Each structure stands twice: as C-alpha cells, then as structure tokens.
Amino acid sequence: RLGENRAKVERMFGLMDRFLKNDPATLQNDIVNHVEYTVARSRFSFDDFEAYQALTHSVRDRLIERWHDTQICFRRKDPKRLYFLSLEYLMGRSLSNSVINLGIRDQYADALSQLGFDFEVLAEQEGDAALGNGGLARLSACQMDSLATLDYPAWGYGLRYQYGLFRQVILDGYQHEQPDYWLNFGNPWEIERIHVTYTVKFYGTVEEENFKGGKHKVWVPNETVEAVAYDNLIPGYGTRNTITLRLWAAKPSDQNDMESYNTGDYINAVVNRQRAETISSILYPDDRSHQGKELRLKQQYFFVSASLQDIIRRFKDTHSNFDDFPEKVALQLNDTHPSLAIAEVMRVLVDEENLSWSRAWDISCKIFTFTTHTVLPEASEKIPVDLLGSLLPRHLQIIYEINFRFLEELKKRIGLDYDRLSRMSIIEEGAVKSIRMANLSIVCSHTVNGVSKMHAELLKTRVFKDFYELWPHKFHYKTNGVTQRRWVVVSNPSLCALISKWLGTEAWIRDMDLLVGLQEYATNGDLHEEWKMVRKVNKMRLAEYIEAMSGVKVSVDAMFDVQLKRIHEYKRQFLNILGIIHRYDCIKNMEKKDRRNVVPRVCIIGGKAAPGYEIAKKIIKLCHAVAEKINNDPDIGDLLKLVFIPDYNITVAELVIPGADLSQHLSTAGHEASGTGCMKFLMNGCLLLATADGSTIEIIEEIGADNMFLFGAKVSEVPVLRKKAPNLKVPLQFARVVRMVRNGYFGFEDYFESLCDSVEVDNDFYLLGADFESYLEAQAAADKAFIDEEKWTQMSILSTAGSGRFSSDRTIDDYAEKTWGIERCRCPA
Ligand code: H53
C-alpha cells in the first residue's frame, strides 16, 4: 500500500508541475480562463464586475496554494495552536489586501492594464464584508492579519452571518437601517466545506445513566442544527503563511422533524427546517448592550459548539490523552460572547470523554484566556438563568457546579463576607436571576487582559476589583494595535511609498518600530514638500467623494477635521457638534474684516447608531440639521462646512482617514477602553484632538503632548466632577449653544429636547459642559498650529514616526509570548 501511495503522490506531483506563476502572461491567462470557466462569460465580452470576479478567483487560487502548504506545515510540526473565538469580524474588502500580502499587486496591475482594465477600478467592485459592529470586530480582523504575518499557528472562528451590519441610509437627516444581504453577489473569498459539518444540539432534558458503578449525565436534546464550515483564507505579508478564518453557517439537520414527515405534513416540515438557518442569519447591531434574547444565545452556543468540535477533532487526529490538551491548544475568548465555551469544554470532557470533574477543570483552566474590551457596566453580558436552562439545560447545571465549587474555595480564602461573595458569584440574584459571563470567564481563564494600560488600571481598581485582589497574577493588559498593512499600505499607497523612500526600506511593513527613523527628517524641507503633496492628493480624493455623496463642495485648503466612529453618548459626537455651532456663531457675530483670520474647516462626522439607541439617532439628525444651516449660509462660504458621511464602514474609513488633517477622539475620560481609530489616523500623519483616555494616554507617551491637542478632565477627575455635578459652573458659551438647539435655531426643537436635557447641569453624565471650555481651547490651538504649515507638517511626520507601537504585530507578539504560549511556525518558501 505504501508503494501504491508513493506512486500516487508522484503522479500528482507530476501533474501539478509547479506553483502558479505570477508573470503577466500567466496572470492574464488565469483571469481570462476564470472569465470563461468560473464566471461563465465569454472571454470576448465581459464587464468590470465579471472581470473583478475572475480576478478574485485567480487571486484565490494563489491563496489556496499557500494555505495548503501552511496547513501541511502545521500538521507536520504539530505546534501549540491558538484558537481565536470571536463573534464578530470586520474584514472590509479583501482584494487589495490579498494581492499586497501576496506581494503581487504590481504584477496584477500590469497584467490587467494590458487587458484594458484598471486594477483600482475593479477593486471598487468589491463589497464591504461587515460581520461586526465596531472597534472590537475590526480589532479581530487586524489581529488575524498579524497572526498570519508573524507565522503563528492560529485559527479564527466565528459566524457567517447572512446579513452583516445594517446599511445606514439617511432620509431627511434621519438614520434608517437597511439589511445588508452581503452575499447577494456571491463571495469568492470563502470556500464552502460541505464535508466539514457538525451537529449542534439545543433544548431537551438531562437524564442520568448508570456508568461504571456511578451516575452519568446525558443531555437529550430535542432540536439539532448542522454547522457548515466556510473558510476564509488570511494571507500573511512577507511570508507564505496563510491561515484560516473558519465561519459557521447554520443548515437544517436531517434528523429533525421525522415525526412531521411521517404524519404527512410535508410542506410544514420543510418550512420548519428552514428555520434552522435563522441562527446564523443576522448580526446583532447593538454592540454595547445585550438584552438576553434567545436567538443571540443560540448564536453563541452554535458557534462555540461547532468550533470546539472542530478543535477537539483536530487534536484527536494526533493525540489520545487529554492531559496533553493544554500543550497543544490555547482558546482565546474575545470578550464574553464566546464564554459558553467554558461550560461546553467541561461538558465534553466530563460527559463525553468521561474525565473526572477535577481533571476536566484543571485542563480547562490551563487553556482559556480572556480579553475584555469595556468598562461600561451596560456592556457586560448577563444571561437569564431561565433562558439558559431551557436552551442548554446541561450547561446550566455545569455553570452552577463551577460556581458552587468556586464559592466554596472563595469562602476558604475570604471567609463569610457575603457582600463580596455575592458580588463575585457567577450567578446574579435579583429580579431576573442571571449568569454573569464576565465572572465565569475570569474564574476559568488563566489570564485576563485589558486593552490598554488605563483600561487595566480600571479593571483592577473598579470593574473587577474583587477578582484582582483574589488573583492579582491573572490580570494583564495588551494595548490594542492595528495592522499597518491595511491602514497604510493598502489605504494610503502614496504615503507608504514615501515612507519607504525616506527610510530606504520597506521593512517597516513588518516591523513598525522602524518608523522612528522618520524623526530624523522631521524638519527636512524636501520631505516636507513631498509629505504635503501626498496629503493634498489624499484630500482631493476625499473632497471628490464628499461632493459625489453629499453635493457639498469643499476646499482642500481648509482643515479636514474628522470624527468617525459608532455614535455613542460617551464618545461625545454631540460635543463636536456643539463646538461647530459655537464656531458658526462666532463667525456670524464677527466683523467682516475679522473673518479673514478664521482658519477654514471642513468638519466631517460619520458613524452608525444602534437601531434602538434614540439619543444616538438624534445626534445624527442634529448633525444634518446644523449642516443644512451652515452649508447654505452665504455669510459663511468656505470658512466652515459640515458633512455627515453616511454608511460608515471599513471601505469608507480607508478613503477618509488618509485625507484627514485633524481627527477627534472625545470620549469622557475613563470610558473608552482603548480606541483604535486614533491609531489609524496617527499612522497616516493626522493630528489628534483628544481626551486623555484609553490608548491616547499611551499615544501621548510616544509622541509627546505637544504633538497633539489634548483637553478635558482626566480619568481621576471624572468621578469628582460627577459628584459636584449640580453645582458645576458651566461656561456661558456652552449654555448658549445648547439654547440655540433647544430654541429651534436649527429646527426640530421638540425632537431635540431630550438630547438637550441630557446635557443639562444636573444630568450631564458625560460632562460635555464641564469639558467645553477646554475643548474650545484645544480647537483654538489646532487652528493656530494649522496656519503654521511647517509646524503642522512636522507634527504630522512625528505622529507617523511615533505610531510604531500601535501596530497589531506588537500586540500579537505580546499575546503569543505572555498569554497564549505559542511559537512561530513558518511555512518554508
Ligand atoms: O473594543 C475596542 C476598543 C474600544 C471598545 C470596543 C468595544 C466594542 O467595539 C464593542 C463592545 C465592547 O464592549 C467594546 O469600545 O474602546 O478599542 C477593541 O478593544
């Protein structure tokens, strides 16, 4: 048989001949063949979209080759593997990113231009894959890129939602949500694995069986659904390594409804089967509040169960003893959304693999690591016990058992301090008895990470104080980072080329610390000229986009001032708008001759509001109402413009960020766990106007406070100010601009009433009034700096030069070494 096998392998090698080549003729041939045989259009007649489809298939072929090699390499070396569990990924487009990481962008551009196509035009055909909400989801995508680039043996797992994040449509200034059926035009980037399917169970009862002289629990479900794998290939940059992001889709299971078939209700039986697919149909659009919905819980378990079956199957391919599991597996919980994995691992080990409870628990505690992304209490997940008990009865028992044993241990450590015991319990008693998913995650994980230095401090001193005092060794932080491949190389090619030219190397694309080399040229006149030119071209591109999308013509000589992020009260887009109203008011009340001294601004705001978040939606409407007034005021002209960019997503961010002069990060100090948008702007040489919150505190350490415009209360001052709240003195300008909104200067006064109420002195939880004066001062400082072109350019260069620390490569290396205990495993060239 061995000889037979060898002969077969040799025959296959003979047929394969060599890897796909990347010269223009081969690329053209491949593209045209895909037009004909994959897209099924004639090679004599195909349009841009069909060309795009064929192009992506030829790129995909090349990804598959590398991916196969990588998987073989991982299998041979059998390293410890990282499994990254996240319910959300914001991947955006894949084409440019893939060809750049494969190192064949220019070859493709040449090949296409000889065929009469422009690479950039075809790239515009691609939709934006938005299987996530905001920062957390984009972070997962950036981390996948770094894991591949740094050769780590990693797998991402998630859900393949049929409807991604809603599309935001603005009608009369109001946000409307439309479904994002992103798979409408097919998705060439995924590979459906019809043979990689697992059965996921729900509902039912737990029975007891006699087993080896004792009792054994058996879960008898009464609904099953199939999970089908869809693999998305993630190529590293400057390496052959290409890793897998495996997303699960729900499909009806054959085992269902036998009864209805037998009773002859065929039509209903088929209709019922279709219901199974709803599990993976829609992404929940609220990223910071969870309402204990059954479908959401089903999604969580569906994804966790399928992923774990896959992970355990892979382990068992080569290992038979579960004591080796922690040497081979690290399970990363991206927030609490996948935390049911803890109960599921225990269930599999105890009920199915027949390990003792203590052995199973010991193994579990060695494999789980947990990253939390928030400080907001409303974002912490709680699952009603009744809901869990009905959907996953065995898991509820297991969680109770974990909690019982934990509390027993805890009593031994801290005595009968019932307040503290009840705070730390995994079960929250109260009107609705619930499971605290964060507590469950902390109890079982060997490491708990925050996402910035400040965040970690707040976790230790406030959010998880009790746990920190119990297990100080568990608590760490890894400041977030973003991938420079996507956020500079793909989205800002001219800046990328300029950086490489001045550093004399492209090595910074894999080693961002090299960017400090730019500091040396921060005052170099030649670099200044080239830097300004690159920035201006990016601004022109953005100005064209703004005009096409909103009809507003903007001057590229104005300062482009941008705030892009989910709309949330704590992020204070309202503060930004009030500042704009103040600016407008000042210009209106100025003598004509003084207007010459005004620094022209284009204020750009973009972001989605969760569909049920009323105040956030009002902020969007206010932005439009104010824009309407300002942009049509002949008195104002180019001195001030306000535009709202609709349907903010990754693709839009790639266009806007490189064209921004100033970006705003206004969260009330102590509320943004990290923030990653600021890092993208920083890399692109955009100056920051920000509070000292989350990761901006560390940006200050890197580039110095005099290279940015800081304002507002510090983290430690916020609670003090809140206590003083009703007696706080609010600046007159603040009262004035709020009154303008309240009194209908921009119309819709009834609609804006509750928004205005939310910042009244005794109600101003996010401290807009308290921070207003200092905000205006920072804005004035930004204006002053902008007039001094040399100064501004120097600050811009120093921002990019100081952004090295905020690469997700640094974050991932840190996680690999200190949290996951995994090593690089490079696939040979
Ligand atoms: O996660 C980002 C942080 C950011 C934080 C964000 C986040 C979500 O996007 C969604 C839910 C959640 O609890 C936190 O708000 O500060 O940068 C990545 O860590």
Image (spheres, rainbow, N blue to C red):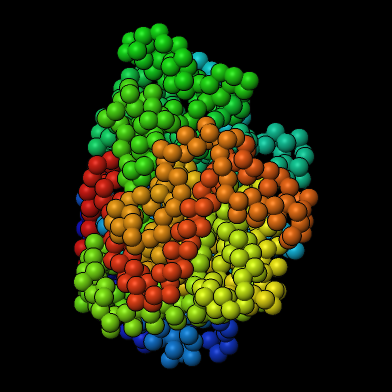
Of residue 25 and residue 401, the one placed in the foreground of this image is 401
Residue under the point 33% across and 51% down: 698
Using the image, determine if residue 459 lies above or below residue 758.
above
Which residue sits furthest top? 416
Quadrant of the rendered image containing residue 623: bottom right
Of residue 24 and residue 207, the one placed in the foreground of this image is 24
Of residue 687 and residue 32, the one placed in the foreground of this image is 687
Residue 612 in sight: no
Quarter holding the C terminus is bottom left
Residue under the point 30% across and 57% down: 704
Using the image, determine if residue 515 lies above or below residue 283.
below
Q: Position of residue 13 (x, y in %)?
A: 27, 69
Using the image, determine if residue 412 lies above or below residue 811.
above
**468 sits to left or right of 618:** left
Using the image, determine if residue 716 lies above or below residue 517.
above
Quadrant of the rendered image containing residue 222: top right
Q: Position of residue 32 (x, y in %)?
A: 47, 83
Quadrant of the rendered image containing residue 463: top left
Residue under the point 30% across and 67% down: 798
Residue under the point 35% across and 69% down: 796
Q: How many marks?
A: 0
**182 sits to left or right of 806:** right
**292 sits to left or right of 523:** right
Q: Position of residue 279 (x, y in %)?
A: 60, 44
Of residue 446 and residue 712, the one placed in the foreground of this image is 712
Q: Position of residue 515 (x, y in %)?
A: 25, 66
Residue 117 in sight: yes
